[in-house]
Image: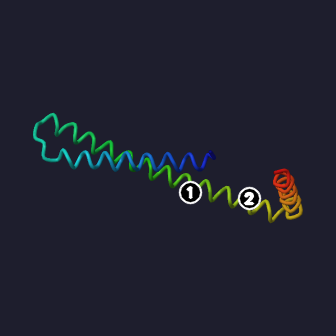
């Protein structure tokens, strides 16, 4: 599994945990008691922090992806013949591997 797929899966898992946590908080909204109120307040605070961290992680991931894409684009523009040679080599290897099957 690629790193990007792993990060995407992790983000989706965290989103699901947050959604389940929100459902739990809503389900216990009517429960009385000082201790329940304290735990509920801490849980809501933790939930807000988790959402913020997930948003920050997403922003960082997108910024890195854009930076890498920009670097790759610049490299291809600066070295067009090398890029063509690399692409041809990769295509050749894929062709060899596919023809063996």
Q: x and y percent of residue 34 in the render?
A: 12, 36
Looking at the picture, does residue 90 appear above or below residue 80? above
Looking at the picture, does residue 89 appear above or below residue 17? below
Question: Residue sitting at 27 percent across and 41 percent down?
Answer: 43
Question: Residue sitting at 49 percent across and 45 percent down?
Answer: 10
Q: Quadrant of residue 41?
A: top left
Question: Residue sitting at 87 percent across and 60 percent down?
Answer: 88
Q: Which residue is mark 1?
A: 62
On the rendered image, what quadrant is the N terminus found in?
top right
Question: Alpha-carbon distance for marks 1 and 2?
Answer: 15 Å
Q: x and y percent of residue 69 in the render?
A: 68, 59
- Looking at this view, name the residue that lies furthest to the front: 101
Q: Quadrant of residue 31?
A: top left
- Looking at this view, name the residue that lies furthest to the left: 32
What crowding class fits label 2: few (fewer than 14 Cα within 10 Å), some (14-19), or many (20 or more)? few
Question: Residue sitting at 69 percent across and 61 percent down?
Answer: 70
94, 78: nearer the viewer: 94
- Of the two numbered discs 1 and 2 on the same chain, state the one appearing first in sequence: 1
| Residue at disc 1, secondary structure | helix
What crowding class fits label 1: few (fewer than 14 Cα within 10 Å), some (14-19), or many (20 or more)? few
Q: Along the horizontal axis of the image, is 69 left or right of 25?
A: right
Q: Along the horizontal axis of the image, is 47 left or right of 95?
A: left
| Residue at disc 2, secondary structure | helix
Q: Which residue is mark 2?
A: 72
Looking at the picture, does residue 33 appear above or below residue 52? above
């Amino acid at each position: 599994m690629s790193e990007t797929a792993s990060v995407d899966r992790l983000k989706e898992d965290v989103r699901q945990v947050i959604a389940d946590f929100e459902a739990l908080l809503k389900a216990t909204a009517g429960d009385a008691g000082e201790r329940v109120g304290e735990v509920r307040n801490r849980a809501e605070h933790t939930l807000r922090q988790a959402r913020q961290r997930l948003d920050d992680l997403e922003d960082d991931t997108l910024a890195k992806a854009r930076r890498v894409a920009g670097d790759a684009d610049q490299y291809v523009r600066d070295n067009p013949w090398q890029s063509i040679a690399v692409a041809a080599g990769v295509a050749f290897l894929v062709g060899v591997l596919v023809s063996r099957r």
